[in-house]
Image (tube, grey):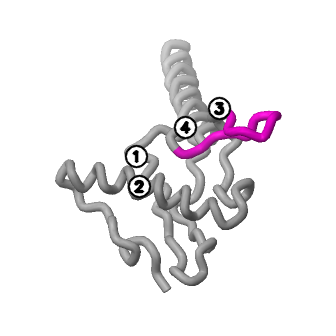
Amino acid sequence: MLKKSLTIAMVSAITFGFIMITAGVSLAKNVGPETFKLTQVKRMGSITFTHRKHQGRFECKTCHHTKAADGTKGPYVAGQEALCNTCHKGKRFPRKMMKFCKTCHKKMKKEGKNPPVRCRGCHVK
């Protein structure tokens, strides 16, 4: 009887531990939204950005960063991710972002992949 009780207790403890570790990992990782819309360029149309798809290909620090005390680009800090337009405002940002995206998309195209590289591939009215 004691042996059976100990076995049940051990299996329960291991199961509980596994559940807590799994829950902790999924709660700790901020994966952000699956997709979101970028609407800064009204005349070109909005862009539905596939955040999850990009997460599988790049490290977070490829796109995300913080703002340093002097106003310049600071290092990436996990947990401080925000939508780009939270901080980046103004007419120059869409051009900078487009250049950033197009550079990567063109590189992928040369590698034989099929990312959008023309305006209407991303911008939808």
Q: Main secondary structure of the magenta part?
A: loop
Q: Which residue is mark 1?
A: 56
Residues at marks 4 and 3 touching, judged by CB atoms closer than 8 Å: yes
CA distance for labels 3 and 2: 23 Å
Q: Earlier in the sequence, mark 1 or mark 4?
A: 1
Q: Position of residue 11 (x, y in %)?
A: 50, 25
Q: Position of residue 1 (x, y in %)?
A: 52, 17
Per the rendered image, the range of residues in magenta is 63-74
Give the mark toward the camera: 1 or 3: 3
Q: Which residue is mark 4?
A: 61
Residue 62 higher or lower than 33, as above or below: above
In the image, 113 versus 92, the foreground residue is: 92
Mark 3 lies on a secondary structure that is: loop
CA distance for labels 1 and 3: 21 Å
Identify the image quadrant of residue 24: top right
**Residue at point 20%, 48% (across, down):** 111
Q: Which residue is mark 3?
A: 75
Say which amino acid is labelled 1. Gly
Q: Earlier in the sequence, mark 4 or mark 3?
A: 4
CA distance for labels 1 and 4: 13 Å
Q: Which residue is mark 2?
A: 53
Give the mark toward the camera: 1 or 4: 4
Residues at marks 1 and 2 touching, judged by CB atoms closer than 8 Å: yes
Identify the image quadrant of residue 12: top right
Mark 4 lies on a secondary structure that is: helix
Q: Residues within 10 Å of mark 3 (few under 14, many from 20)?
A: few
